Image: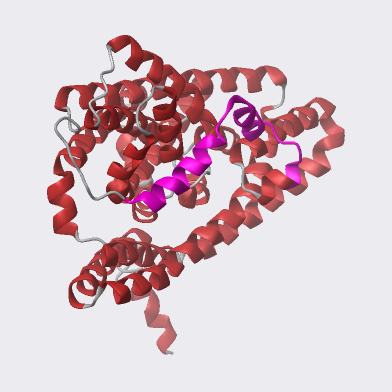
Amino acid sequence: MQHQHIPNKPSFFRNLTTQIIIAMVLGAILGVSIFHYTDMATAKSFSSSIKILATIFIRLVQMLIAPLVFTTLVVGIAKLGDVKSVGRIGGKALAWFFTASFISLCIGMLWVNVLKPGVGLNLSDVDVKSVNEVTEKTHAFSAQNFVEHIFPKSIFEAMAANEILQIVIFSIFFGLAAASIGENSKPVVNALDKTSHIILKMVGYVMKFAPIGVFGAIAGVFAVRDLSELIITYTKFFGSFLVGIGSLWLVLLFIGFLFLKGRIFTLLKRIVSPLIIAFGTTSSEAVFPKLTEELERFGIKDKIVSFMLPLGYSFNLDGSMMYMTFASIFIAQAYGVPLDFGTQMSMLLVLMLTSKGIAGVPRASLVVVAATCGMFNIPIEGIALILPIDHFCDMFRSATNVLGNSIATSVVGQWEKEE
């Protein structure tokens, strides 16, 4: 008879958000203890071992992203019914994304110029190996590659490499074609619809592993970083960055409030656990499936969610955008490279375009920052200045990306309802 008492356990600890917060705290405590009470070699080997937990979780989520984007987007477009409504919603989405990106880039540019975190900085602790990894990717970053990164030559290759943007392009064509055939495409669309529900069920299983993944990610980072030293050296950079991210949150929430009124608070309640997972794992991709579910629960039609979210993940990374202008100009300040207003504005426009094809690339923001620095004759080695603290910035960037996409999807969903 005992099993009947289980439901009466306090739901507090069964709540995913609570479990993740506990996992973050425990991970930080374990990581800091390892750092202080063992030698560096032990700490490094511990860090790489425990990070496997995070790798497993992120890989489990990644295996679901391609099939989920494909099935939900095709079904979403086929349900929208015609090219006209796809064009209407797509137009609204892109107008929103480009405006949001521009605002985010401007906020980064504003605060880095006001607070000048890079001025008078001289950091000798330069991690050259990691810089080489980033710059190797940068050299390949050209117009040709940019186009190749967006348009797939094979949908199977795109799915294998989890290239969200390429999968989105293929799915849009597939969905439009299915919609234009009408009744005859029903069996295929229905089969994809059922498949997407099965994948969302799988998401539920994978999410149970989230706290363990977050625990591994946090413990791994704290085990090899002396927090007090990092904080002293980088207070100015990190503090200024937080001011920027904080003001971006205020702007996003204010815009959300203008359109959604009081429902913005319901939305925030819904997306707390995706926000925390993104924060802990520094991967906004890791919450894509969970976010899809929560936004549908919030009351946005599934066809809107499945159309908007994959697009948002490719075009609407507000946190990353804000960081890109901030970091690029910070490096220029640190090296004493003067940038007048005109140069900064053209840098902003370059970032606006180059950042659109980077979804799903790990440490993508750094690759784009390195590429931008190269274009404007700012020393690319400057990436080394921000590498040690990049992980902590990435936590805030990832959570901000999730917030931006949730608000964008909700607002467009509301507009469509009103029509």
Q: Main secondary structure of the magenta part?
A: helix
**Position of 295 relative to 32 (above/below):** above
Q: Which residues are magenta?
A: 127-156
Residue 190 point in image, percent of width and height:
76, 44
Q: Residue at x 34, y 74 (%)?
A: 8
Q: Quadrant of residue 82?
A: top right
Q: Quadrant of residue 211?
A: bottom left
Residue 391 point in image, percent of width and height:
33, 50
What colour-coding does the image apply? secondary structure
Q: Residue at x 21, y 68 (%)?
A: 32
Residue 76 shows in the view: no
Horizontal placement of 405 versus 323: left or right?
Answer: right
Residue 352 point in image, percent of width and height:
45, 22
Q: Residue 140: say if magenta.
A: yes
Horizontal placement of 318 versus 253: left or right?
Answer: right
Residue 193 point in image, percent of width and height:
70, 46
**Position of 176 relative to 276 (above/below):** above
Q: Residue 153: say if magenta.
A: yes
Image quadrant in which the N terminus is located: bottom left
Image quadrant in which the C terminus is located: top right
Q: Quadrant of residue 49?
A: bottom left
